[in-house]
């Protein structure tokens, strides 16, 4: 008697060849909102993979925001605000690493706007000592966590 294939085996898509994967990546890079990044370290690669998944999850969160079986507005706003704080912390980390190696860091305009709106980590009660330095387009804020 022949063994019946499991549901997972029946629904598996055929694996793409290396050429097909490369072609798909090139096609995706041509899309309107696409960002292409060369990864030079394992940590950056892991962060990039996490960010791709986060982007998909945030898209779904926004679609389900306020829906009866979705996410409440209060919970959704809290999640989105936490993401804004994390974006600022990642920018601060990039500035710290850049400063350590003498690399000029330009804080993204979107991050500067989030800071002006008051989404910084100081809202979480984390003490910070501020240090300002010059950059393209004005002063770039760099903060070091204290405690």
Image (cartoon, rainbow, N blue to C red):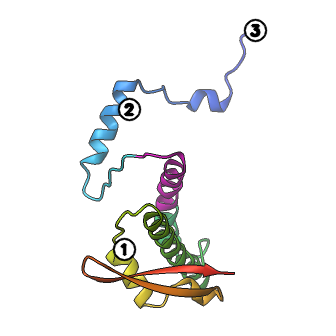
Distance from the alpha carbon under mark 2 to that under mark 3: 38 Å
Nearer-N-terminus badge (1/3)? 3
Residue wearing tag 1: 107
Residue 66 makes an appearance in the image? no
Of labels 2 and 3, the one closer to you:
2
The magenta segment is: 39-56
Seen at 41% across and 23% down, the residue is 17
Quarter holding residue 4: top right
Q: Is residue 111 magenta?
A: no
Q: Main secondary structure of the magenta part?
A: helix
Seen at 72% across and 15% down, the residue is 3
Position of residue 117 in the picture relative to residue 10 (left or right) = left
Check disc 3 and report its element: helix, strand or loop.
Answer: loop
57 or 95: nearer the viewer: 95
Of labels 2 and 1, the one closer to you:
1
Distance from the alpha carbon under mark 2 to that under mark 1: 33 Å
Residue wearing tag 3: 1
Are circles 2 and 1 on residues that touch, CB within 8 Å? no
Residue 39 is labelled as: none
Residue wearing tag 2: 21
Check disc 2 and report its element: helix, strand or loop.
Answer: helix
Image height check: is 112 above or below 56? below
Distance from the alpha carbon under mark 1 to that under mark 3: 65 Å
Image height check: is 11 above or below 133? above
Mark 2 surroundings within 10 Å by alpha-carbon count, few (fewer than 14), some (14 through 19), many (20 or more): few
Seen at 35% across and 28% down, the residue is 20
Of labels 1 and 3, the one closer to you:
1
């Amino acid at each position: 008697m022949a063994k019946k294939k499991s549901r997972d085996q029946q629904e598996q898509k055929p694996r793409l060849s290396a050429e097909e994967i490369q072609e798909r990546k090139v096609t995706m890079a041509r899309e309107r909102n696409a960002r292409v990044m060369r990864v030079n370290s394992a940590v950056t690669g892991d962060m990039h993979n996490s960010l791709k998944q986060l982007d998909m999850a945030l898209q779904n969160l926004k679609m389900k925001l306020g829906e009866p079986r979705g996410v409440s507005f209060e919970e959704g706003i809290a999640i989105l605000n936490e993401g804004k704080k994390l974006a600022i912390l990642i920018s601060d980390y990039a500035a710290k690493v850049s400063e350590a190696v003498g690399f000029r860091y330009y804080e993204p305009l979107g991050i500067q706007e989030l800071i002006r709106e008051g989404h910084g980590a100081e809202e979480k009660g984390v003490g910070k000592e501020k240090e300002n330095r010059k950059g393209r387009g004005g002063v770039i804020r760099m903060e070091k966590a204290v405690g």
